[in-house]
Amino acid sequence: MPIFNYDFKVNAPLKAVADFHEDTNALKVLNPPGIIVQLHRVEPMGEGSISEFTLWFGPFPIRWKAEHSDVSINGFTDTLVEGPAASWVHTHRYESISSDETQLFERIEYEHKPGFMGLVTRILFSPLNLKILFTYRQWATRNSIKKKLEQV
């Protein structure tokens, strides 16, 4: 089973990081240009909440349904219920480093389906593409939280 890990720091308190990820629009912010997110159903973050969306890679739609668990101020896990992979468990963890700095840890454990869809996910979610995606997410998270804190 492939595993992808990524971590980075944000110059913001733990609560600001948790609040950003609990926002139902965060998924739209966290995807780079070229990947359009169409939200179908996004319940407020909570134990057992569901997010259903389509990721558009150009003209190609990838439908996704995830369930959230282990929800706390220190993060959450989203688990694929229906979608392109055989399995996908994405754990987001936040750790306070100081009163105004937080470390984020991202971990994805996943398996590809056999056949054509497995080929598609091997390309879309290759280690290199995940690294590029999460490098963008690092920037988007820092930028969004910074803007929000400046408004306060």
Image: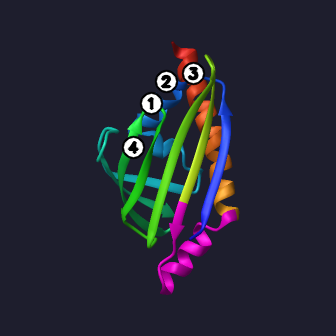
Determine which of the numbered discs, if any, sits on residue 73 in the image: 1
Sequence-first disc among 3 and 1 = 3
Residue at 46% x, 71% y is 85
Mark 3 highlights which residue?
A: 13
- Is 143 drawn above or below residue 117 in the view shown? above
- Density class for disc 3 (Cα within 10 Å; few <14, some 14-19, many ≥20) is some
Image x and y of residue 92, in percent: 52, 44
- How far is the residue under mark 3 from the one under mark 1? 11 Å
Number of dots carrying numbers: 4
Whether residue 67 sits left or right of residue 30 in the image: it is left
Image coords of residue 81 (percent x, y)? 34, 63
> Disc 4 marks which residue?
70
Q: Name the residue tied to disc 2.
A: 15
Circle nearer the N terminus (3, 4)? 3
Q: Earlier in the sequence, mark 2 or mark 1?
A: 2
Work out how far the residue at label 4 is from the one at label 1, CA to CA, in angstroms: 10 Å
Q: CA distance from mark 2 to mark 1?
A: 7 Å
Tell me the element at label 1: loop
Residue 100 placed where, x, y %? 63, 18
Of tags 4 and 2, which is closer to the observer? 4
Q: Is residue 113 above or below residue 31?
A: below
Q: Are marks 2 and 1 in contact (CB under 8 Å)?
A: yes
In the rendered view, tell whether residue 75 sits above or below residue 63: above
Label 2 sits on a secondary structure element that is helix
Colour scheme in use = rainbow
Tell me which corner region of the image, top left, top right, bottom left or bottom right, holds residue 53: bottom left
Q: Which residues are magenta?
A: 109-127
